[in-house]
Image: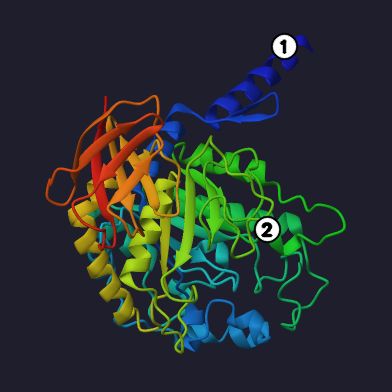
Amino acid sequence: MKNRLFLNVIITLTLLINCQWSIVNGQYRPTAENLKARSEFQDKKLGIFLHWGVYAMMGQGEWVMNNRNINYEEYAKMPAGFYPAKFDAEAWVKAFKDAGVNYITFTSRHHDGFSMFNSKASEGYNIVEATPFKRDVIKELADACAKYGITLNFYYSHLDWHRLDYPLGNTGRQLGRPTDQQNWKSYYKFMNDQLTELLTQYGPIGAIWFDGVWDHASDAEPYDWQLEEQYALIHKLQPACLVGNNHHKNLNPGEDIQIFERDLPGQNSAGFSGDMQVSNEVPLESCQTMSDVWGYNITDMHFKSTKELVQMLVHAAGLNANLLMNIGPQPDGQLPAESLKRLKEIGEWTRQYGETIYGTRGGLVTPRDWGVTTQKGNKLYVHILKWQDRGLFLPLAGHKLSQAKLFRDGTPVKLVKAQTGYLLELPEVPTDIDTIVELIVD
């Protein structure tokens, strides 16, 4: 009896070690590999979000199945006509690389339940088995990312409008699905089988980006998604793989990234972040659309200007966050021309000024109406985004600053010490997308 008890203890300890994570006093403890990956993620600063699936064929966004109440059996006929003949993973990734992008988050499976990878767990409902295209686009993306040194992350939906075993939530209730086949145990196994495929078939993965637990937000009792066990599986399969969840709530144990949808950390203009407290323990990420929508919409030409997008990136960096900028590829597999134009122009900016963004953290001066600061070692970068005067005051009493100059060409900037900080006397009124002053913090 004692030997059996001892054996059980050893097995339990071994499982915890193999999972590469633990909960001590109710707190998730990341491994050294995970902490290193977090720091590297913070250094990357700019990512591309890709919402792409069979829904692109209808040109009405990724929620078209739910929004148009399309019968689940009728929707399942769409993959038979999905043939993105112009898809070129290397062309995509090269365009991202040239823009200064350091990671990609790709929708491996969205709420419509269709898998964009070679998934045996999906029972034939995937791009390789259900379409005439028969190519694993994720495998091709993974190979291209490896070639160009870009990290690949996966978006993964917790909800599913296709599978009958998914326990119905707030969405997908008008799709003609029977309600007597819901089975959480079966659905949970399916998800974990797919996550195992994603983390064993495509090399090192930077992060799993979850979405959809809000589908049960109005349940009378809090829904148990068994997240901790799922996160443990991910950390076991790839200890350095980060976990993020777009649940619009404060962090759960096992989560390594805090996500802010359509907002910067601490803001709530989109209405998703009202209950969220900004964490100072994990990397932060703001996901934003390049146009108005996530998935391809044939009528959406409301693309943000390059100035807006660059300033989003700078604002995010000043708040110690990354920017995940979304593109919805076309049904033929090409990136929209307007997206490519923005990427080219962003690349021109990052090649000249990326040093003041990549590898930095939020600077000594917290964000102001005029802009933000970033910092790398003893270099402080003042990003002036909106200012109509030559003088700019920095409230940095107690710090010693020197060697002020414009980053773009090294033009000296006069630095006047005051009792409560420093005054920058700029050579001219700032007119650039981002006028950057570099200073040394002694």
Q: Is 419 drawn above or below residue 383 in the view shown? A: above
> Counting other residues with Cα less than 10 Å from the Cα at mark 2, is it few (<14), some (14-19), or many (20 or more)?
some
Looking at the picture, how far across and down is residue 192, in whole percent? 60, 52
Question: Quadrant location of the C terminus?
Answer: top left
The residue positioned 80% from the left and 62% from the top of the image is: 218
Q: Which image quarter: residue 396?
A: top left
Q: Which image quarter: residue 362?
A: top left
- Observer-side mark, 2 or 1, equals 2
Residue 201, visible in the rendered structure: no
Looking at the picture, how far across and down is residue 179, in whole percent? 81, 74
Real-space CA distance between mark 2 and mark 1, rounded to the nearest whole angstrom: 43 Å
Write down the residue under mark 1.
Answer: 3
Q: Label 1 amino acid?
A: Asn
Mark 2 vs mark 1: which is more N-terminal? Answer: 1
Looking at the image, residue 218 sits to the left or right of residue 285; the answer is right
Q: Is 168 drawn above or below residue 268 in the view shown? A: below
Write down the residue under mark 2.
Answer: 213
Q: How is the image coloured?
A: rainbow
Q: Label 2 amino acid?
A: Val
Looking at the picture, how far across and down is residue 345, in whole percent? 24, 68
Label disc, if present, on residue 139 of the rendered structure: none
Labels 2 & 1 near each other (Cβ < 8 A): no
Looking at the picture, how far across and down is residue 112, in whole percent? 59, 74
The residue positioned 19% from the left and 43% from the top of the image is: 413
